[in-house]
Amino acid sequence: MTETATHTQGGFTPPVRFAVPGRIAVSEQVATRWQTATITGIRRETARAATFRLAVPGWAGHLPGQHLQLRLTAADGYVAQRHYSIASAPDDSGHIELTLVHVEGGEVSGWFHTVARVGDRVAVRGPLSGFFAWPGDRPALLIGAGSGVVPLMAMVRHHRARGLSVPLRLLVSARSPGELIYAREFSPETTRVFTRSAPAGVPVGRLAAAHLAPLLAERPPGGWETYVCGSNAFAEHASRLLVAAGQPVDRIRIERFG
Amino acid sequence: MNSTTRGFTGRPRAARPGLPPGQYDAGDDWPVLSAEVTPDLAPADWTFRIGGLVAQARTWDWEQAHALPASAYSGDIHCVTGWSKFGVRFGGVSLDAFLDAAGPLPSATHAVAYAHTGYTTNLPLADLTGGRAWIVWEYGGQPLAPEHGGPARLLVPHLYFWKSAKWIAGLELLDHDEPGFWERNGYHARGNPWQEQRYSGD
């Protein structure tokens, strides 16, 4: 591979254009300041997932797909920090929502699922990162598995709240109907993939090219911006299927949950 | 703000002298967090170039890079998302061997590392010299897996791991600092885990 790096007026440009340039400018001053968030509501989603509604009076707003950093502090000063995708759409009057799966042995998700109640306070800062954000400008094909549906749901909610006409399609994968987060909120055209057990008449199996083909075939003006979110194994599998189906790599954004 | 969270005790306080502030021990896990599609890059197609402010721009292919003196890193790595991984072992070549061949000019102060995917990240040149950075192609004695940056990645273990660019294609030496991909997305210019330099402004 012969490569020639170039310098332009904008600075150094590598020989290959990066697949996923950031979508938005990030406000550094606001994003890095820790703020108090107060739990104002808790909603069960599945046996292992619940949504926590937080009041953050100074919240600067976010774009669908962005995440935040959350911090819990023990009495002895011990601190645990995690990154969580924001589930709610922007324009939520000083509130944000997080949907957290109870991770076995997880000190932070464990606190949320077994200790937290309305009125409790935690610390958050954000929104963070811009590459997985969707401002609602381009046709978007969203592909998520497990809790990977969370940032994608923020995009769906944004699309609904604003009454946007730009095409938006969602494909979700879950082990079973009972583990499908936000199941009641999906529209009929959402593609559902069940890998372990499915409702009667729905096949059980892994995400396959046949699931993606009809969505990719819609070919909206300007093409799909694809957003893939889930475990690394799912992200690798889904992104390979997209590439094999002809989706350009520079139109595939991936958020992997570690 | 850092007030106490009601009822939060956290995991047992195992003494971990090698754990930077705000990090946790990932144990056997090695999370993958790249934002792009894992490239289909064979060793035969891999090259590594050092250009910019150097006496002579140089490019190495797989064979030429492997002909340089072998060097290994055994120690810990730290990801900005919060996990640290202890006692890892990478094999490759010290970046000093590549830089010595190219000859950085006195005016060179920073570098942009770039990947075969176009990913970029910026580093002070001082963080890339003196036996603190490597080009690696082995992990735990095995070829580095594609999702972890194989066939070869940059390794700068004393900084947060987004600086250790996967699928490394080259270093461009500059006389100024130029933000890379994450750095333009709000992340810190240097990323020292011991000073918890996660985001711009930290």
Image (cartoon, grey):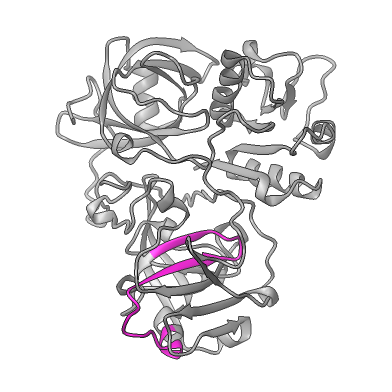
Q: Position of residue B16 (x, y in %)?
A: 25, 52
In which image quadrant can residue B128 be found? Answer: bottom left
Residue located 75% across and 49% down the image = A243
Q: Position of residue A57 (x, y in %)?
A: 29, 17
- In this view of the protein, which residue sits in the foreground, B176 or B68? B176
- In this view of the protein, which residue sits in the foreground, A49 or B55? B55
- In this view of the protein, which residue sits in the foreground, A244 or B102? B102
Residue located 51% across and 48% down the image = B33
In which image quadrant can residue A29 be found? Answer: top left
Q: Is residue A181 visible?
A: no
Residue farthest left in this picture:
A76
Height in image: A190 above or below A27? above
Q: Quadrant of the N terminus of chain A?
A: bottom right
Q: Position of residue B30 (x, y in %)?
A: 48, 52
Q: Does the magenta run of residues contain B103?
A: yes
- Would residue B167 be found to the left or right of residue B18 on screen? right
Q: Does the magenta run of residues contain B120?
A: yes
In which image quadrant can residue B64 be found? Answer: bottom right
Q: Is residue A204 visible?
A: yes
- Would residue B170 be found to the left or right of residue A245 on screen? left
Height in image: A41 above or below A225? above
Residue extent of the magenta highlight: B99-122
Q: How many marks?
A: 0
- In this view of the protein, which residue sits in the foreground, B118 or B29? B118
- Would residue A129 be found to the left or right of residue A239 on screen? left
Height in image: A60 above or below B85? above
Residue located 36% across and 33% down the image = A126
Q: Position of residue A63 (x, y in %)?
A: 49, 29
